[in-house]
Image (cartoon, rainbow, N blue to C red):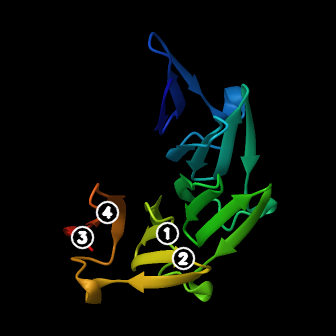
Amino acid sequence: SIWCGTTAGLSRFDGKTFHTFTKKKDGLVNDIINALAKDKMGKIWIGTEQGLSCYSQGQFSNYTVEDGLNDNFVQAIMVDKTDRIWIGTKKGISILQNGKFVSYGVKEGLVSGWVESIIQDYAGNIWIGAHNGVSVFKDGSFTNYDSRHGFPSEKVFTICQDRERNMWFGTIRGMCKL
């Protein structure tokens, strides 16, 4: 199946037809979808403007600040190699592991509270694109990069790693690599 987040719910295309899941009809936490990820068990994780949803075996489970998420506005989701769910919000990062959230923000060393993208590189480091630059989470701490490191803008929206293991960053004013 192909999954697509829209401003009118979550759509699944099975190769023949589309099925759209909504808050009202199916229990999705919100219909405005900002991010999607699939874990090793096949669960679909959905980031919305009002929290996080998980679709598994035909049902939705929803997570909000009441459950330990650091903010309800979810902009990015990434499943790492150990199947932890990394959630980027307007207030930093929440990591869901074994049913519990652990959160990191500016106070813990993250470059910015507003997170736009998250990826894991080949070495296992977590790269976080945010409104004030990029943070790399390695061995329990953050290393931060910003315009002083050659970024055309400190608003980093996308991150990817190429086959040669170069890190590429899409910013509001162009792209660059480290």
Instruction: Give whichever of discs 1 and 3 has the lower sequence position.
Output: 1
Residue located beneath label 1 in the image: 125
Within 10 Å of the Cα at label 4, are there few (<14), some (14-19), or many (20+) other Cα atoms? few
Residue located beneath label 4 in the image: 165
Q: Tell me the kind of residue under disc 2.
A: Lys
Specify the quadrant of the image occupied by residue 16.
top left
Q: Are marks 1 and 2 in contact (CB under 8 Å)?
A: yes
Q: Which of 142 and 147 is in front in this view?
A: 142
Left or right: 58, with 47 as reference point: right
Task: From this view, report whether residue 12 is shown above or below residue 110.
Answer: above
In the structure shown, which secondary structural element does the residue marked by tag 2 occupy? strand
Q: Which residue is drawn at 59% across and 69% down?
A: 93
Instruction: Give whichever of discs 3 and 4 has the lower sequence position.
Output: 4
Q: Which residue is drawn at 44% across and 14% down?
A: 15
Q: Tell me the kind of residue under disc 4.
A: Arg
Q: Which residue is drawn at 72% across and 69% down?
A: 102
How far is mark 4 from mark 2, CA to CA?
16 Å
Q: Tell me the kind of residue under disc 1.
A: Asn
